[in-house]
Amino acid sequence: MKTIRILINGCNGKMGQEVAKKARVMEGIEVLGGIDQSDSGDNFFPVYTDLNNIKELPDVIVDFSVPVASMKVLDFAIEKKVPIVVATTGFSEEELDKIRKAGEKIPVFQSYNMSYSVSVMRNICSELAKLLDGTDIEIVETHHRRKVDSPSGTALMLAESINEALDNKLHYEYNRHDKREKRSPDEIGIHSIRGGTEAGTHSVIYFGEDESMEIKHTVTSRGVFAEGALKAAKFLINQDAGVYNMKDMV
Protein backbone atom coordinates (compact mmCIF):
# COMPACT_ATOMS: atom_id res chain seq x y z
CA MET A 1 0.00 0.00 0.00
CA LYS A 2 1.31 3.40 -1.00
CA THR A 3 1.77 5.83 1.88
CA ILE A 4 -0.32 8.96 1.40
CA ARG A 5 1.39 12.13 2.59
CA ILE A 6 -1.03 14.73 3.89
CA LEU A 7 -0.84 18.42 4.74
CA ILE A 8 -3.22 19.52 7.53
CA ASN A 9 -4.71 22.99 7.15
CA GLY A 10 -5.66 24.32 10.59
CA CYS A 11 -3.27 21.88 12.25
CA ASN A 12 -3.22 23.66 15.63
CA GLY A 13 -7.00 23.64 16.03
CA LYS A 14 -8.87 20.93 17.93
CA MET A 15 -9.82 19.06 14.77
CA GLY A 16 -6.41 19.55 13.20
CA GLN A 17 -4.83 17.96 16.26
CA GLU A 18 -7.32 15.08 16.10
CA VAL A 19 -6.40 14.47 12.45
CA ALA A 20 -2.70 14.46 13.34
CA LYS A 21 -3.28 12.04 16.21
CA LYS A 22 -5.30 9.63 14.05
CA ALA A 23 -2.83 9.92 11.15
CA ARG A 24 0.02 8.92 13.43
CA VAL A 25 -1.51 5.48 13.97
CA MET A 26 -3.42 4.93 10.71
CA GLU A 27 -1.76 2.63 8.22
CA GLY A 28 -0.88 4.23 4.90
CA ILE A 29 -0.96 7.85 6.15
CA GLU A 30 1.98 10.17 6.84
CA VAL A 31 1.74 13.80 7.97
CA LEU A 32 4.04 15.81 5.72
CA GLY A 33 3.29 19.08 7.51
CA GLY A 34 0.67 21.50 8.75
CA ILE A 35 -0.57 25.02 8.06
CA ASP A 36 -1.71 27.50 10.71
CA GLN A 37 -1.33 31.08 11.89
CA SER A 38 1.56 30.19 14.17
CA ASP A 39 3.92 27.33 14.98
CA SER A 40 3.37 26.27 18.59
CA GLY A 41 6.40 23.96 18.43
CA ASP A 42 4.36 21.12 19.93
CA ASN A 43 3.76 19.17 16.71
CA PHE A 44 5.71 16.18 15.41
CA PHE A 45 5.69 17.67 11.89
CA PRO A 46 6.77 21.02 10.40
CA VAL A 47 4.19 23.81 10.57
CA TYR A 48 4.05 26.54 7.92
CA THR A 49 2.55 29.97 8.47
CA ASP A 50 3.04 30.92 4.83
CA LEU A 51 1.88 28.68 1.98
CA ASN A 52 4.78 29.93 -0.15
CA ASN A 53 7.27 28.34 2.26
CA ILE A 54 6.02 24.77 1.87
CA LYS A 55 9.05 22.77 0.77
CA GLU A 56 7.45 19.55 -0.47
CA LEU A 57 4.01 19.02 -2.01
CA PRO A 58 1.65 16.59 -0.27
CA ASP A 59 -0.46 13.95 -1.96
CA VAL A 60 -3.62 15.32 -0.34
CA ILE A 61 -4.53 18.38 1.75
CA VAL A 62 -6.91 17.86 4.69
CA ASP A 63 -8.64 21.11 5.64
CA PHE A 64 -10.18 21.55 9.11
CA SER A 65 -10.02 25.30 9.62
CA VAL A 66 -12.26 28.34 9.05
CA PRO A 67 -13.73 29.49 5.71
CA VAL A 68 -11.22 32.28 5.06
CA ALA A 69 -8.30 29.87 5.59
CA SER A 70 -10.03 27.22 3.48
CA MET A 71 -10.29 29.60 0.54
CA LYS A 72 -6.56 30.39 0.73
CA VAL A 73 -5.50 26.75 0.81
CA LEU A 74 -8.01 25.95 -1.95
CA ASP A 75 -6.23 28.43 -4.22
CA PHE A 76 -2.94 26.74 -3.32
CA ALA A 77 -4.39 23.29 -4.08
CA ILE A 78 -5.64 24.43 -7.49
CA GLU A 79 -2.32 26.07 -8.36
CA LYS A 80 -0.28 23.02 -7.33
CA LYS A 81 -2.89 20.49 -8.58
CA VAL A 82 -3.19 18.79 -5.19
CA PRO A 83 -6.42 16.98 -4.18
CA ILE A 84 -8.12 18.48 -1.11
CA VAL A 85 -10.52 17.23 1.57
CA VAL A 86 -12.62 20.18 2.77
CA ALA A 87 -14.03 19.37 6.21
CA THR A 88 -14.56 22.98 7.29
CA THR A 89 -18.14 24.27 7.63
CA GLY A 90 -19.87 27.64 7.69
CA PHE A 91 -19.24 28.61 4.06
CA SER A 92 -21.17 31.32 2.23
CA GLU A 93 -22.88 30.51 -1.08
CA GLU A 94 -20.06 32.32 -2.89
CA GLU A 95 -17.45 30.18 -1.12
CA LEU A 96 -19.37 26.98 -1.85
CA ASP A 97 -19.50 27.98 -5.51
CA LYS A 98 -15.72 28.41 -5.47
CA ILE A 99 -15.34 24.90 -4.01
CA ARG A 100 -17.58 23.48 -6.74
CA LYS A 101 -15.59 25.25 -9.46
CA ALA A 102 -12.34 23.91 -7.98
CA GLY A 103 -13.70 20.45 -8.76
CA GLU A 104 -13.36 21.25 -12.44
CA LYS A 105 -9.58 21.25 -12.01
CA ILE A 106 -8.73 18.95 -9.08
CA PRO A 107 -10.36 16.22 -6.98
CA VAL A 108 -12.26 17.86 -4.09
CA PHE A 109 -13.97 16.02 -1.24
CA GLN A 110 -16.42 18.28 0.61
CA SER A 111 -18.76 17.21 3.38
CA TYR A 112 -20.52 18.95 6.26
CA ASN A 113 -19.91 15.89 8.41
CA MET A 114 -17.15 13.31 8.09
CA SER A 115 -18.94 10.60 10.08
CA TYR A 116 -19.97 7.47 8.16
CA SER A 117 -22.92 7.00 10.54
CA VAL A 118 -24.25 10.48 9.75
CA SER A 119 -24.24 9.54 6.07
CA VAL A 120 -26.33 6.50 6.97
CA MET A 121 -28.62 8.75 9.06
CA ARG A 122 -29.06 11.03 6.06
CA ASN A 123 -30.28 8.10 3.94
CA ILE A 124 -32.63 6.88 6.67
CA CYS A 125 -34.13 10.34 7.23
CA SER A 126 -34.82 10.91 3.54
CA GLU A 127 -36.55 7.52 3.25
CA LEU A 128 -38.61 8.17 6.40
CA ALA A 129 -39.67 11.53 5.01
CA LYS A 130 -41.33 9.71 2.09
CA LEU A 131 -42.85 7.01 4.28
CA LEU A 132 -44.11 9.55 6.81
CA ASP A 133 -45.12 12.28 4.37
CA GLY A 134 -47.45 14.74 6.07
CA THR A 135 -45.73 14.65 9.44
CA ASP A 136 -44.23 17.78 11.03
CA ILE A 137 -40.44 17.51 10.80
CA GLU A 138 -38.11 19.25 13.24
CA ILE A 139 -34.30 19.12 13.41
CA VAL A 140 -32.40 19.87 16.64
CA GLU A 141 -28.60 20.12 16.74
CA THR A 142 -26.29 20.64 19.71
CA HIS A 143 -22.62 21.68 19.61
CA HIS A 144 -19.90 23.09 21.83
CA ARG A 145 -19.81 26.77 22.74
CA ARG A 146 -16.97 27.54 20.31
CA LYS A 147 -18.81 26.55 17.14
CA VAL A 148 -19.36 29.73 15.15
CA ASP A 149 -21.80 28.64 12.42
CA SER A 150 -25.47 28.09 13.18
CA PRO A 151 -27.27 25.98 12.19
CA SER A 152 -24.62 23.33 11.66
CA GLY A 153 -23.76 22.17 8.18
CA THR A 154 -24.92 18.69 9.18
CA ALA A 155 -28.36 19.98 10.15
CA LEU A 156 -28.65 21.69 6.77
CA MET A 157 -27.45 18.53 5.02
CA LEU A 158 -30.16 16.50 6.77
CA ALA A 159 -32.79 19.11 5.94
CA GLU A 160 -31.75 19.13 2.28
CA SER A 161 -31.90 15.34 2.01
CA ILE A 162 -35.40 15.35 3.51
CA ASN A 163 -36.57 18.18 1.29
CA GLU A 164 -35.20 16.52 -1.85
CA ALA A 165 -37.11 13.34 -0.95
CA LEU A 166 -40.29 15.44 -0.76
CA ASP A 167 -39.75 17.23 -4.10
CA ASN A 168 -38.37 20.36 -2.41
CA LYS A 169 -41.81 21.45 -1.25
CA LEU A 170 -40.70 22.53 2.24
CA HIS A 171 -39.00 25.68 3.50
CA TYR A 172 -36.72 26.02 6.53
CA GLU A 173 -37.82 27.85 9.66
CA TYR A 174 -34.99 29.00 11.93
CA ASN A 175 -36.77 31.39 14.27
CA ARG A 176 -40.35 31.39 15.53
CA HIS A 177 -39.66 33.97 18.24
CA ASP A 178 -41.52 36.83 16.57
CA LYS A 179 -44.28 34.73 15.04
CA ARG A 180 -47.83 34.53 16.40
CA GLU A 181 -49.27 31.88 14.14
CA LYS A 182 -49.64 28.12 14.00
CA ARG A 183 -46.93 25.94 12.54
CA SER A 184 -47.00 25.67 8.76
CA PRO A 185 -47.20 22.12 7.36
CA ASP A 186 -44.73 23.19 4.67
CA GLU A 187 -41.73 23.85 6.90
CA ILE A 188 -38.84 22.05 8.57
CA GLY A 189 -37.95 23.63 11.90
CA ILE A 190 -34.19 23.81 12.53
CA HIS A 191 -32.97 24.59 16.05
CA SER A 192 -29.42 25.15 17.35
CA ILE A 193 -28.14 24.67 20.90
CA ARG A 194 -24.64 25.75 21.94
CA GLY A 195 -22.84 24.96 25.17
CA GLY A 196 -20.02 23.20 26.95
CA THR A 197 -17.81 20.81 25.02
CA GLU A 198 -20.51 18.86 23.19
CA ALA A 199 -18.90 17.30 20.10
CA GLY A 200 -22.17 17.09 18.19
CA THR A 201 -25.71 15.72 18.48
CA HIS A 202 -28.34 15.77 15.73
CA SER A 203 -31.97 14.72 16.06
CA VAL A 204 -34.63 14.56 13.36
CA ILE A 205 -38.15 14.24 14.77
CA TYR A 206 -41.26 13.31 12.78
CA PHE A 207 -44.44 14.41 14.56
CA GLY A 208 -47.68 12.72 13.50
CA GLU A 209 -51.11 12.54 15.08
CA ASP A 210 -50.72 11.15 18.63
CA GLU A 211 -47.27 9.71 17.90
CA SER A 212 -43.75 10.74 16.92
CA MET A 213 -40.51 9.15 15.73
CA GLU A 214 -36.98 10.39 16.39
CA ILE A 215 -33.71 9.53 14.66
CA LYS A 216 -30.71 10.67 16.70
CA HIS A 217 -26.95 10.66 16.21
CA THR A 218 -24.50 11.55 18.99
CA VAL A 219 -20.74 11.98 18.72
CA THR A 220 -18.69 11.53 21.91
CA SER A 221 -15.27 12.11 20.36
CA ARG A 222 -14.01 14.36 17.55
CA GLY A 223 -11.82 11.45 16.51
CA VAL A 224 -14.80 10.14 14.50
CA PHE A 225 -14.56 13.13 12.16
CA ALA A 226 -10.76 12.93 11.93
CA GLU A 227 -10.86 9.27 10.95
CA GLY A 228 -13.53 10.01 8.34
CA ALA A 229 -11.41 12.81 6.85
CA LEU A 230 -8.40 10.51 6.55
CA LYS A 231 -10.52 7.83 4.88
CA ALA A 232 -11.70 10.54 2.49
CA ALA A 233 -8.06 11.37 1.73
CA LYS A 234 -7.39 7.72 0.87
CA PHE A 235 -10.49 7.70 -1.35
CA LEU A 236 -9.66 10.97 -3.08
CA ILE A 237 -6.14 10.04 -4.11
CA ASN A 238 -7.54 7.69 -6.79
CA GLN A 239 -10.21 10.03 -8.19
CA ASP A 240 -10.32 12.29 -11.23
CA ALA A 241 -11.17 15.99 -10.97
CA GLY A 242 -14.62 16.51 -9.49
CA VAL A 243 -16.45 17.23 -6.25
CA TYR A 244 -17.09 14.18 -4.06
CA ASN A 245 -18.86 13.61 -0.73
CA MET A 246 -19.65 10.88 1.79
CA LYS A 247 -22.26 9.29 -0.49
CA ASP A 248 -19.58 8.71 -3.14
CA MET A 249 -17.19 7.16 -0.62
CA VAL A 250 -19.82 4.99 1.04
Image: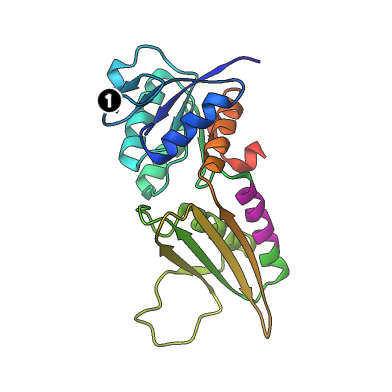
Residue 39: x and y in percent read 29, 26
Residue 9: x and y in percent read 39, 31
Say left or right for 44 vs 53: right
Total number of numbered labels?
1
Q: Quadrant location of the N terminus?
A: top right
Q: Residue furthest top?
A: 55
Q: Is residue 120 magenta?
A: yes
Q: Residue at x 45, y 56 (%)?
A: 152
Residue 71: x and y in percent read 34, 35
Q: Residue furthest front?
A: 42
Q: Residues within 10 Å of mark 1 (few under 14, many from 20)?
A: few
Q: Residue at x 51, y 53 (%)?
A: 154
Q: Is residue 64 magenta?
A: no
Residue 155 appears in view: yes
Occupied quadrant, residue 149: bottom left
Q: Nearer the viewer, residue 241 or 18?
A: 18
Instruction: Identify the magenta region.
Output: 117-127
Q: Residue at x 70, y 71 (%)?
A: 132
The answer to whether residue 210 is above or below residue 76 is below
Q: Residue at x 57, y 33 (%)?
A: 232
Task: Report which residue position mark 1 lands on.
Answer: 49
Q: Residue furthest right?
A: 131
Magenta stretch: helix, strand or loop mostly: helix
Query: Label 1 sits on what residue type?
Result: Thr
Say left or right for 152 vs 213: left
The answer to whether residue 177 is above or below residue 234 is below
The answer to whether residue 73 is above or below residue 175 is above
Helix, strand or loop at mark 1: loop
